[in-house]
Image (cartoon, rainbow, N blue to C red):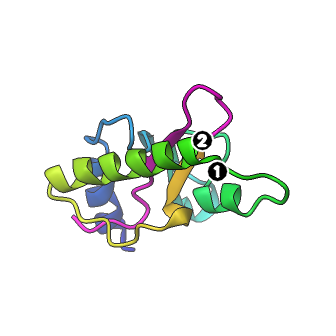
């Protein structure tokens, strides 16, 4: 991605505010060579893929439905802003399933077309 495109995308995603979209905090210069990196919200369990591949653990149906609903609501929000994700998969859904009362799933905007 070219620098100008990076800044264009960063400006747009900085305006996205929704409970099911990964929060964007800013951009940092990531060391020598002036590599740019985004700073985002931390999700304790990482990707949904990582959670689903855990050995000896599984998500019960209640949590699965909540995660699916969160992903759908997050995608609906992106579409309402005329943003097409194009890469919805388990790797791009970040989760916190440790809270027994309410698991949370957030859509990462890693691959979006604006």
Provide the secondary structure element on which disc 1 rests. loop
The residue sitting at 72% across, 52% down in the picture is 58
Residues 23 and 56: in front is 56
The image shows residue 64 at horizontal and vertical percentages of 54, 49
> Which image quadrant: the N terminus?
bottom left
The residue sitting at 44% across, 62% down in the picture is 110
Q: Are marks 2 and 1 in contact (CB under 8 Å)?
A: yes
The image shows residue 86 at horizontal and vertical percentages of 33, 72
Q: Which mark is residue 46?
A: 1
Q: Is residue 47 above or below residue 88?
A: above
Separation of marks 2 and 1 at Cα, in angstroms: 5 Å
Provide the secondary structure element on which disc 2 rests. loop
The image shows residue 96 at horizontal and vertical percentages of 60, 39
State the predominant SS element of the stretch in magenta.
loop
Count the marks: how many?
2
> Which image quadrant: the C terminus?
bottom left
Q: Which residue is mark 2?
A: 43
Circle 2 packing at 10 Å, graded few (<14), some (14-19), many (20+), is some
Q: Quadrant of residue 9?
A: bottom left
Which span is picked out in magenta? 96-114
Circle 1 packing at 10 Å, graded few (<14), some (14-19), many (20+), is some
């Amino acid at each position: 991605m070219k620098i100008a495109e990076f800044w264009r995308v960063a400006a747009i995603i900085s305006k996205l505010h929704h409970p099911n979209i990964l929060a964007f905090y800013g951009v940092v210069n990531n060391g020598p060579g002036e590599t740019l990196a985004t700073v985002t919200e931390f999700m304790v369990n990482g990707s949904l893929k990582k959670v689903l591949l855990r050995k000896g653990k599984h998500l019960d149906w209640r949590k699965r439905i909540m995660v699916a609903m969160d992903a759908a609501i997050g995608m609906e929000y992106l579409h309402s802003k005329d943003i097409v994700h194009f890469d919805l998969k388990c790797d791009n859904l970040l989760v916190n399933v440790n809270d027994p009362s309410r698991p949370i799933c957030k859509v990462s905007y890693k691959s979006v077309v604006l």
